[in-house]
Amino acid sequence: MKYDHRDLPIQQKSGVTIGMSMTEKQGGSDVRLNTTTASPIESHRQGPGCSYSLRGHKWFTSAPMSDAFLTLAKVAGSEALSCFIVPRWLPDGSRNEGFRVMRLKDKLADRANASSEVEYEGAWAQMIGGEGLGVKTIIEMVQSTRLDCTLGSAAGARRALQQQCIIVKADIRVGPHRAAPDEEPAGGPVVEAEAHTMLAFHMASAFDKWHNEGSEADRDVFRIGVSVSKYFVTKRLPALTYECLEVFGGNGFVEDFPMSRLFRHSPLNSIWEGSGNVIALDVLRGSKQLPMLWKDILLCEGADSGLDQYLKVLERDIQKLLKMNPLEAQRHARNLVDRLAMAMEASALIRFGDSKVAESFIDILLCEGADAGLDQYLKALERDVQKLLNMNLLEAQRHARNLVDRLAMAMEA
């Protein structure tokens, strides 16, 4: 199938694009508060495949140039959401006049992929899935697009890193404050971008095995793992992009160079398909699948003693959280998902990545000061400061940024 940009009925096109239309003003990410209603066009024909008339609004409709849209609405008399597909053209070849684009969003970035506000004024739609099963029906699509967001942000990290490499190689004035990528501290953009890539492709592999081989184990790993991955990889991209932007100096802050556009675009995937709090709560709700994800993470067990200790502490804290009441558990959800994601990345690097990159990731991002009290953290930091002071100048430069980060955290504590 190829992309067909023509505005024609679906049956006349060589390829179609399907957009999403779920969010409403009053509910935001909580689609349970949606108020759009669906009334059967023929009272004696209701349910999947039958025709309905939709009335309501959607605050965010992605890709309004699409040929059809998946949307959520409540059938009259029901509080449960059902899923519908709203085509731009009707089966008889006429326009779906009840689907009205009110305006395009004036977005921070990604303007080429428009977002819009839509009104349904008797829009023709067909139910898919089953009455009251809207969230269950659409969640498979959401999981797929969460994988898209993870892959996109991993690609964004590599794109930003590529720009950093180009400017470093081209700039003969590079000094210690603009270390070349292979001279970055081990916790820098190079290692982080590689970790994001390994995790994204591990989730893509689980998705393929689930759909192509019917693997139930990979299904469970993917369902909760893709939420953890999407949360972490997309959320880390803005910080990583800024690190690469900084190498440009002042040039990184002007529109003549690519980094300003990449930086504006970098937060987008963390907002699409569930922002941080939404996904952290999703992980809590899907905690029954955590044992399978944990089993997958532990496939790296024994490769590194520091990582083994990290996993031991993390497993203990997961068990504590699962025993908490829901309100208390929500307070700890983001921290748990952060640490789960780092464990997933470390495991993926050990199993599929470069051993030196994996070692650097574990040493810097997991083991130094992780889960220790402040006294232990300061003791480890003091030890590493003394090590750095005894290094030669070039070697010390490679570790300088990491040391300053940790010193600042100690000062804040």
Image: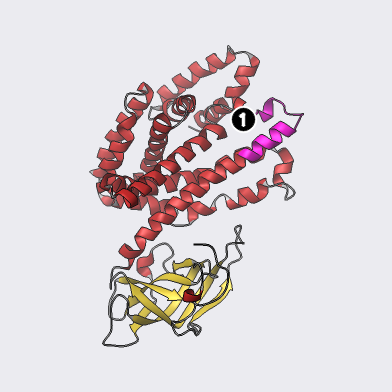
Specify the quadrant of the image occupied by residue 20.
Answer: bottom left
Q: Magenta stretch: dominant SS?
A: helix
Note whether residue 274 is visible.
no
Q: Residue furthest left?
A: 323
Q: Residues within 10 Å of mark 1 (few under 14, many from 20)?
A: some
User: Which residue, given by chain and number where applicable, does mark 1 sit on?
Assistant: 181
The stretch in magenta equals: 162-180
Q: Is residue 396 magenta?
A: no
Q: Closest to the observer: 365 or 295?
A: 295
Note whether residue 43 is visible.
yes
**What residue is at 28 percent from the left and 43 percent from the top?**
290
Indicate the position of residue 257 as horizontal and vertical percent values: 72, 46
User: Looking at numbered disc 1 in the image, what kind of residue is underneath it?
Assistant: Pro
SS of the residue under disc 1 = helix
**What residue is at 32 percent from the left and 27 percent from the top?**
301
Specify the quadrant of the image occupied by residue 250.
Answer: top right
User: Is 217 located above or below residue 56 in the figure?
Assistant: above
